[in-house]
Image (tube, rainbow, N blue to C red):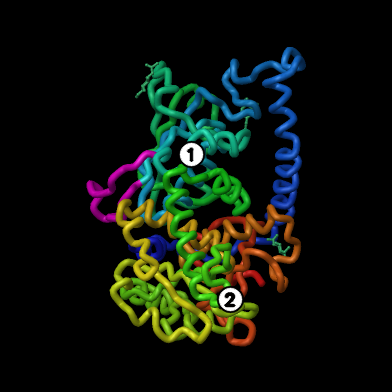
Amino acid sequence: MDLVSDCKISASACSPHLGSIAGKCAALLIFALASRTVFVLLSPGLNGQANNDASSVLIPDLSLVGFDDYGIRMHKFLEVPQIVWGLNNQKIAFARACLTARMLNRTLLMPSLSASLFYKEVDLLQPISFDKVFQFDRFNSLCSGFVRLGRYSELSNKTATVELVKGSGRKWTVERDIDQLKEFASDSLDNHEIIRIVGKNPFLWHDHWPVGDYGRVFECLVLVDEISKEADRVIDRIRVASNGESESNAGVVEPVPYVAVHMRIEKDWMIHCKKLEQRLNIKEICSSKDEIMARVGKLSGLRPPTVVYLAVADSLLEDSSILAGWRDGLVPFEKKRLGVDVIYQKYPYLIQSAIDYEVCLRADIFVGNSFSTFSSLVVLDRTQKMLRSGVRSFCGEDVKWPSYAYNIPGELDGPKRWVTKMNDSNLQAISYGSNDISC
Ligand SMILES: *[C@@H]1O[C@H](CO)[C@@H](O)[C@H](O)[C@H]1NC(C)=O
Ligand SMILES: *[C@@H]1O[C@H](CO)[C@@H](O)[C@H](O)[C@H]1NC(C)=O
Ligand SMILES: *[C@@H]1O[C@H](CO)[C@@H](O)[C@H](O)[C@H]1NC(C)=O
């Protein structure tokens, strides 16, 4: 698997406005987050009422008039271009398409993802249907009231499709982009059953939404059973390997903690990150193999022997030196040494990447690079897991699901603790990386 392009693309597409709009949006966001909580708390009740008991006589069935239970219209659709590039670029692009549809109060027609990574040769971008990777019905039930996915078979085809051509170039500002969306939400254009957005892939659209809204969409993405079972198999192998390393536990198979390191040191990444360091005038983007090993070795609270799963690009699987040089007590594995490369080989790039993502997501400790989209989304997901489990002080000592960035020095020369700022006003830091991480 090649996780390189994930970031290579991000960089070439990187817009120069790195400044943040932080402060003024804060209050609004907190309000939005708070009201959403209330909304979620109320939802199950409303749902039950509308569907099951006698009170449904009093509450009109909104789906009959074309809204789902909480107001996303079911008979107005948004269509977007095929979603392309790395797994995590695709997730971001998909969420952006969902949030655009939400703004237009429309159902998003289930888009095509791309199974392969040949981002320059458009004919090689094998389309793969969203529901081959993520559960369609689960998505709609988890995201109910927030965003909605529809199928082409739901279309009536009674009105002509209207096209929304995304502007581009330097003069196409965030403001012009939002004005265009508002125009398409207006009465005259709103009659059309389908608004089709034409132009570049949604990852490159201007962003208008806070991190919390993206998080809300990501939470609804649940892998189909086939893929999540493969991830289970890989994780089982890691835990068995951990047991094998632990003499006192010999023969006993029980969950043993493991560390996952998303190790970006392959040649393409090194070339890319050096350029990025120059352009952004930041020294903390590239980490050498030795720096990563040294920082991970200084993680506090590890009980040796600990298995370290290395999520690396395929090109590094032939390089046995990545398994050497770890401090005593850390036992490194990549998919080849673990014997799970056969599992991965059955699948195209996108699925391989999705499996590795799960392995990193579920690790007891995750260490990544804060300039990688892949690492950044893993950390966002882990931050949400912490939130859901009721953690208050994310950066405290004994929290579950801690994450770290090895490219930034932290306490005692170890990697720096890392949580996602869920109240950030846009996704810039996650899409393109940042060395300004919380904790
Ligand atoms: C986000 O939350 C953190 C921690 O609660 C706070 O320090 C920060 O000021 C907040 N930022 C914004 C933009 O609201
Ligand atoms: C969508 O439109 C319906 C009817 O106009 C409205 O009741 C609902 O609140 C809207 N939903 C959103 C998310 O704007
Ligand atoms: C409208 O067209 C789509 C395919 O473009 C098709 O799946 C759907 O069944 C059509 N709807 C009707 C009512 O014919």
Q: Residue at x 31, y 52 (%)?
A: 346
- Decide: few, some or many residues near mark 2? Use Cα within 10 Å; few <14, some 14-19, many ≥20: few
Residue 120 in the magenta stretch? The answer is yes
Q: Mark 1 is on which residue type? A: Gln
Residue at 43% x, 27% y: name it. Answer: 194
20 in the magenta segment: no
Q: Nearer the viewer, residue 154 or 48?
A: 48
Q: Around disc 1, counting alpha carbons within 10 Å, would you say few (fewer than 14), some (14 to 19), or many (20 or more)?
A: some
As drawn, the label of residue 135 is 1
| In this view, the mark in front (1 or 2) | 2
- Residue at 58% across, 63% down: 255
Relative vertical location of residue 403 with respect to residue 155 in this rendering, above or below = below
Q: Position of residue 236 (x, y in %)?
A: 49, 59
Residue furthest front in the image: 251
Secondary structure of the residue carrying numbered label 2 = helix
Question: Which residue position holds label 2?
Answer: 248
Q: Is mark 1 within 8 Å of ligand 3?
A: no
What residue span does the magenta drawing correspond to? 114-129
Residue 326: give x, y in percent of width and height: 46, 84
Q: Residue at x 42, y 67 (%)?
A: 311
- Figure quadrant, ligand 3: top left
Q: Nearer the viewer, residue 251 or 412?
A: 251
Quadrant, the N terminus = bottom left
